[in-house]
Image (cartoon, helix red, strand yellow):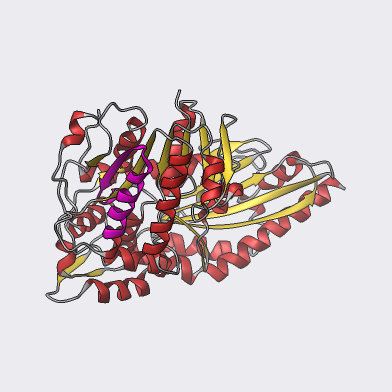
Amino acid sequence: MNKVLLTGATGYIGGRLLRRFQEKSIPLVCFTRRVEALRHKVSSGTTLAEGDVQNKEDLVRAMQGVDVAYYLIHSMGGKHNFEEADRIAAQNFAEAARECHVKRIVYLGGLGSPGEELSTHLKSRHEVGEILKSSNAQTIEFRASIVIGSGSLSFELVRTLVDRLPILIMPKWVRVPAQPIWINDLLRYLEQALDVKCEKNNVFEIGGSEIVSYRKLMEIYAQQMGLKRLMVNVPVLTPYLSSLWLGLVTPVFARIGRRLVNSLKNPTVVNDFSSKQFFDVTPIGVEVAISKSIVNEDQEFAETRWSDAISSSGTSLFGGTKLGRRIVDHRSITVKSTPQKAFGVISSLGGEKGWLYANWAWSLRGFLDLLFGGVGIRRGRKHPTRLYSGDVLDWWRVEEIETDCFLLLRAEMKVPGRAWLKFEISPKDLSGDITITQTAIFDPKGLSGLIYWYSLHLIHLAIFSGMLKEIGNLAKQDNE
């Protein structure tokens, strides 16, 4: 079995490819600058190699005995000249692969006709592919357009704009044709490239089954999310001016987003269909891809421990951490108690006992919910101390529960979005301490959802912090 070197495993595509390779028990070396970000994600058959692609010696050490090397990195998010950084990184990678006798390099670049005046971003992507071919290893270069999937930069830009703006300005470049590909279809190409039988140094153009535009993506996403958006065509608004405006609307993507927008003047469609001869992949269409991405995001988010997700997100905003389209507000407290006693306090919340802190605020919120046709807090709870999956708890419903470990509540009040409240309890350590973690999760629906969250953030902060402190105090008192 081929030994694989994987770069970009802390990123969007590389991280998903890491999971698939590990499921197949492929011998794997993950080359990364941040070993700690991957330590909890790798299996026993995966080796972590710390280093920087700007340092060839680091790459040579990591590539010892490697058969296939995946190059899934770029420097577009850097503060300095990303073209030069990409050029040096690719040269180092090619030279290290030649010295270590790597048999194959797999690289993911970007679509764009070489005969056109390409953007700086696309020129750099194509240049990297040419440099990697100098390694003497067989180089398989994929060129793709927009990747549809929760976490993809292009898709997140579309979602952020549609979610936040009721009126969308549509310059000419938004109507430039593209051929988006669903993340799972892209991953299938990358997986099959590990041992596909083909001639040396191939460039494969890959895309979904439809040619659309950014505007069409926005329309489809808005429709699937139930958002009404007015889209206004304008004759003049250059990609550069649009990128400056993007930095104001979506500051979290400002640096990378500006460079990406500047490349949107180029059509990114498949003109060479030779990939069909070598790969067993039938890409799906845009509407299905967006729908599946939304559903998959819900499933992946539900299966992820909030603390793990937050630690790997790296993007903090006022009022919580942004994970996909969700906002996560996370806090914890360490007390000398037992999981059983702490969980007993948590599972007794609500009903006649109330929520331990600022009960007047909970009552007021419940009254307002009733005024707007919601359930309020009149439902109470069935039993004063016991909870089961599916039980109602004031305006919450128990979505998942594991005794003495965690409790997940889903809000059924009237809010512009979806909301959850989760409690997790760590096992007792050697010092007799446990950690109680409280996480509020909000999935805003459009601009109204964002306004709702941020306008109430300070109130939520006070209430949830006060509640957690009282839970800790009661758990300690019960323990004494």
Q: Is residue 450 left or right of residue 139?
A: right
In this rendering, does residue 85 appear at all? Answer: yes
Question: Which residue is painted at 43% across and 35% down in the image?
Answer: 102
Give x and y (percent) for residue 394: 54, 50
Q: Which residues are magenta?
A: 122-147
Question: Which residue is painted at 36% across and 39% down in the image?
Answer: 136
Question: Which residue is painted at 44% across and 41% down in the image?
Answer: 97
Q: Is residue 376 magenta?
A: no
Is residue 416 depicted above or below 166 in this figure?
above
In this rendering, does residue 381 appear at all? Answer: no
Is residue 67 depicted above or below 7 in this figure?
above
Q: Quadrant of residue 359?
A: bottom right
Of residues 6 and 389, the one nearer the viewer is 6
Give x and y (percent) for residue 352: 64, 52
Q: Is residue 437 left or right of residue 217?
A: right
Residue located farthest toward the right when viewing the structure as drawn: 480
Question: Which residue is painted at 13% across and 45% down in the image?
Answer: 271
Q: Is residue 225 left or right of residue 114?
A: right
Give x and y (percent) for residue 313: 51, 54
Of residues 429 and 401, the one nearer the viewer is 429
Of residues 438 and 238, the one nearer the viewer is 238
Q: Is residue 131 magenta?
A: yes
Q: Is residue 445 left or right of residue 377?
A: left
